[in-house]
Amino acid sequence: METASITSVTSSPVTDGVAPPKHRRPGQPFPADLRDKRVLDTNNSAAFVGLSTRQWERERERGTSAPVVKLGKRKYGHQVCDLIAWIEARKQQIEAT
């Protein structure tokens, strides 16, 4: 199976010293600097931290979840970097007891 090399999405020249934005194609990995900034919705956040969706919602309601990003009227999310920090803090709490 051959793999195609990925080339720049934009081929327009640089204008006024500013390069055009690089767009991510579906299936391409996120750039390293954005990977941890991605926002996961409630279901994916719960799966990421290893809890059921309802348990994760309870954590949010108590104010003990990772910092919340409001995505819509009734939709919430969490940044991956905050979820990782939340998991690490929980590990330390468990080890301290």
Image (tube, helix red, strand yellow):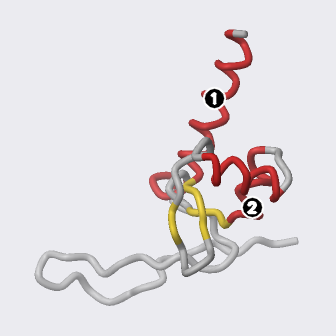
Direction left: furthest residue: 16
Q: Earlier in the sequence, mark 1 or mark 2?
A: 2
Given the image, on which type of amino acid does mark 2 rest? Answer: Asn
Mark number displayed over residue 88: 1
What residue sits 70% from the left and 63% below the top?
42
Residue under label 2, please give it. 44
Q: Where, quadrant-wise, is the N terminus in this rendering?
A: bottom right
What residue sits 61% from the left and 41% below the top?
64
The residue nearer to you, when weighing 37 against 17, is 37
Q: Secondary structure at mark 1?
A: helix
Residue 71 % position (x, y): 54, 74
User: Is residue 1 shown above or below 97?
Assistant: below
What is the distance, in whole Å, between disc 1 and disc 2 at their CAs?
A: 18 Å
Mark number displayed over residue 25: none
What residue sits 62% from the left and 40% below the top?
84
The residue nearer to you, when weighing 87 against 29, is 87
The residue nearer to you, when weighing 7 against 53, is 53
Given the image, on which type of amino acid does mark 1 rest? Answer: Glu
Q: Secondary structure at mark 2?
A: helix
What residue sits 55% from the left and 61% below the top?
38
Direction top: furthest residue: 96
The residue nearer to you, when weighing 32 against 13, is 32
